[in-house]
Image: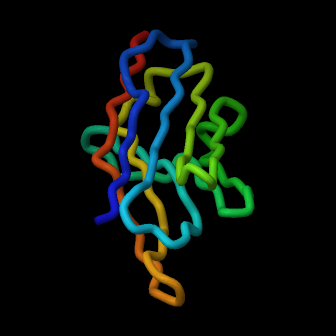
Amino acid sequence: QVQLAESGGGLVQAGGSLRLSCAASGGIFAINDMGWYRQAPDKQRELVASITSSGSTNYADSVKGRFTISRDNAKNTVYLQMNSLKPEDTAVYLCSANLQQRFMGPFYRYWGQGTQVTVSS
């Protein structure tokens, strides 16, 4: 059974930093893209950053220059380094992975439970 386990959220003052981690486990054959999304109260879920298996990255305009996504393919883990945090970054951050559980099998997108990031002004 596939699981995505997130860690690293918390409370930080504006201008501070946090590093999120997400490890995928449970019968994984291959992972295509991995990413971080966020959802604030009364707002739609939005993509924060994504990274392909070859390392190509994509960022939301609101986090460019402040956040960095990276991954360790050997550990099936994706990271999000968040610097210069702002109160508007406050949200639940969810990890996502588009993965395959067997050779030639279909790819499905899986989600973590989410980790709360709160930035105080």
Query: Is residue 14 rendered to the left or right of residue 72?
Result: left
| Nearer the observer, 83 or 28 | 28
The residue positioned 47% from the left and 79% from the top of the image is 107
Against 81, residue 77 (above or below) is below
| Nearer the observer, 48 or 72 | 72
- Total numbered labels placed on residues in the image: 0
- Report the residue that reaches farthest toward the bottom: 104
Percent coordinates x, y for residue 110 in the rendering: 37, 64
Pick the quarter of the image with the N terminus: bottom left
Q: Would you identify the image quadrant in which residue 38 lies?
A: top left
The residue positioned 36% from the left and 45% from the top of the image is 5
| Nearer the observer, 90 or 50 | 50
Percent coordinates x, y for residue 104 in the rendering: 53, 89
What sort of colour scheme is used for the picture? rainbow
| Nearer the observer, 85 or 102 | 102
Percent coordinates x, y for residue 89 in the rendering: 46, 30
Percent coordinates x, y for residue 2 in the rendering: 34, 63
Q: Would you identify the image quadrant in which residue 79 lies?
A: top right
Pick the quarter of the image with the C terminus: top left
Query: Is residue 1 rendered to the left or right of residue 24?
Result: left
The residue positioned 39% from the left and 13% from the top of the image is 120
The residue positioned 28% from the left and 47% from the top of the image is 113
